[in-house]
Amino acid sequence: MTELLEPAIQRPARFALPVGAAPALFGGAVFASASLVFLVQPMVARLVLPTLGGSPAVWNTSMAFFQAALLAGYAYAHLLQRVRDARLQGAIHVAALLAAGLLLPLRVTDAFGAAPPGSADPALWLVGVLALSIGLPFAVLSATAPLLQAWYARVRAGKADAANPYVLYAASNFGSLIALLAYPLVVEPYLRLHTQTTSWSALYGAFVLVMAAVAWSAARAGSAPAPAQVQAPGGAKPAMNVWRERLIWLALAAAPSSLMLGVTSYATTDVASAPFLWVVPLALYLVTFIIAFQAKPLIAQSRALRLHGVAAPAAAFTLTLPTAFIFGQMGLHFAAFFLTALVCHQALAARRPSPERLTEFYLVMSAGGVIGGAFNAFAAPLLFDGVFEYPLVLALACLARPVGQAHPRDRVVFLAGLAAIAGATVAAALLGPGDGPKWILALAAGAAALTSAHPVRYFVLVAALLFSGMAGQRGEVMSSDRSFFGVLRVMRANPEGLGEVRVMMHGTTVHGAQALAPESRCSPTTYYALATPIGQTFTALQARQPALSIGAIGMGAGTVATYVRTGDRMRFFEIDPLVVRAANDPKQFSYINGCARGPIDTVLGDARLSIASEAPGAYDLLLVDAFSSDAVPAHLLTVEAIRLYLDRIKPDGVVVMHLSNRNLELLGPVGSALQAAGAYGMTQRFRPKGPSSVLSAASTDVMLVAKSGQALAPFRNDPRWTPAKPGAPYWTDDYTNLFGAMARKLTAGPAS
């Protein structure tokens, strides 16, 4: 988000400001524009999130769009500066702001006027929605920062700060950071979504008035001499080859942009795709710009290089580990991203050209941001069957390090590190991925830190470290595919010597497992085993009725299909086509096509939108199972969603809500939502006795929901079930608080 770093565009001035309050007026306008730009990004992504099932790719695609819109705004500002008449220039920009305001109040405007998409090409649909909903206001707002800096250089003609509009830099940075931090901490938890969008639209209208006042004030004076050129802080660096220099600017800007989206995907895949996690990498990205372009950087380049020399290989090493300590690993990756982005941006700042090329410099830098974002959002899902863009760019960014003073032993340490990585790779191939090879990789990570004075050696070690870890992991992978909704892998396992087991992994979460032995092939496993609350519910309802109409939100490996009897019928609602394909392929999983004895069909798309088109009272049992880890689709847990589920079950029907989650406490808000919806509920927190494997009953939190207490009669006398109780504030389509759910889970501890 490089609008914070806009240059003064040096042209013959046409106006000077006879107002002593110019710094405050311009500083306030820059602060307001930056705040609006950074506040609307998580807000509009939050608006479209429910339509696409809560996928982390929503934010990545949105960020790629915002970067492109930002570039369009810069291009517009650059062209507008060619208009020599001050009054006309100001009038054009105010008119553009007013024209863009006709698209407000902020809301989701569907591209092509069609219904929300199926799952075939959601990224293009999302880009169209964003373009129609916020594209023009965002681009025009983004253009304000460079325009104001250019105007400031003119209106302060004759003043000490006339030649350096960087006096507005702090106001812009401060406004951006305040907006980014305010959204997850204040706006999202305390304001309904409708209130958020209405308030932002009103603030946009107020800003147009402020901008009109600035333009009028700036245009009042006559001609003034152009401000003297000032050498860029740190000195201008002439380029022997202009195009080579531009490509370097482009690469140094693209790498942090790509890493920002990569580390965001890493964080949101295992917790939730939510604004409180989106803004952390974006805020860190912004701070690296602030530090890199300071006259006296808060973190000197030498210190940044030392810290990066340790953090990058440490982050690379943890990518080979399981996500048992997700928050610690997340913190390490945020730190590695921050330091890598800082190294790149400091290298970029060191290459700043002379002032007459500043506009070109920032335009190229913005284009680099677009390239980095587009690579993650659009190219990577087509090029890779896993999320490899993050480690790939993490390694490539090491080449941005300057060549330091090498020690004679560095080459020895480098060769020893390569030998250690080769040994770990061979050990993992022969012995399987165990602790031994991982400790060898840890030593290699230390070797990378010690050879950090040479960027090429450092890059080679980090890249080899990443390749070795991923090669060890892929030894158990039978197939790997990727869609807009994440990475789906089918793994091979052999737990407790029980023979081969197929395991479906979506991201880092198990979504089903099946034993291949004939005697065990059709036995329900994991969350669906007979002993679990889900198994208990199916057993109780099937004992009561000879034929059931069953709906299931979330397919996974299709394990629950083993409960389908000859007289039953089941309909799955699944958003990811890769999941549907794998679960219906008997060569991978045969629960659906092999174990189920009744008819099963599938509806592809967002489950809530699909169920809304079902007939009222259609189901005896509705299983809602989409929250076990990965990105949590919060719109399936709101009061409105629960009312929809209740309307789609029969008078004596039951909704089974599987609320197990490693990182979020969901029983509290759902219990409160039941009360708000006028429903009846029972809860069971099942914990298996003794050690469990991938085939045994897994720890499960389940809530039963019904229209009446009579429908829950079979469970009332069972001591394993207790009445559902309200907990945290309930969620609605206008309000969710995933940050609070994560905090409650942390304070409750792992046993919860």
Image (tube, rainbow, N blue to C red):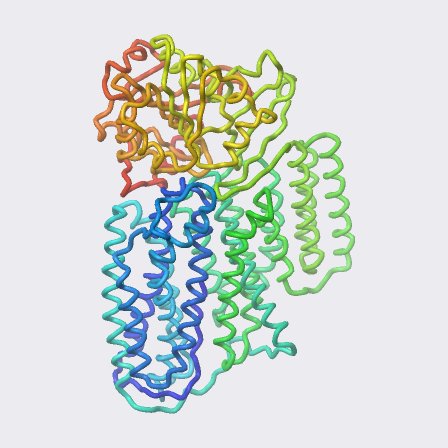
Q: Position of residue 525 (x, y in %)?
A: 51, 19
Q: Is residue 519 above or below residue 133?
A: above
- Comparing 414 with 50, the one in front is 50
Q: Position of residue 603 (x, y in %)?
A: 42, 32
Q: Quadrant of the N terminus?
A: bottom left
Q: Is residue 175 visible?
A: no
Q: Position of residue 710 (x, y in %)?
A: 24, 14
The part of the image, by quadrant, that contains residue 224 is bottom left
Q: Is residue 21 visible?
A: yes
The part of the image, by quadrant, that contains residue 480 is top right
Instruction: Say how many tags the image has.
Output: 0
- Left or right of residue 320, residue 46 in this image: left
Q: Residue at x 50, y 54 (%)?
A: 260
Q: Is residue 663 above or below residue 568?
A: below
Q: Is residue 351 above or below residue 548?
A: below
Q: Position of residue 19 (x, y in %)?
A: 25, 83
Q: Is residue 374 above or below residue 575?
A: below
- Comparing 311 with 361, the one in front is 361
- Left or right of residue 453, residue 575 in this image: left
Q: Quadrant of the C terminus?
A: top left
Q: Residue at x 36, y 89 (%)?
A: 158
Q: Residue at x 56, y 66 (%)?
A: 250
- Left or right of residue 510, residue 459 in this image: right
Q: Residue at x 35, y 79 (%)?
A: 152
The part of the image, by quadrant, that contains residue 441 is top right
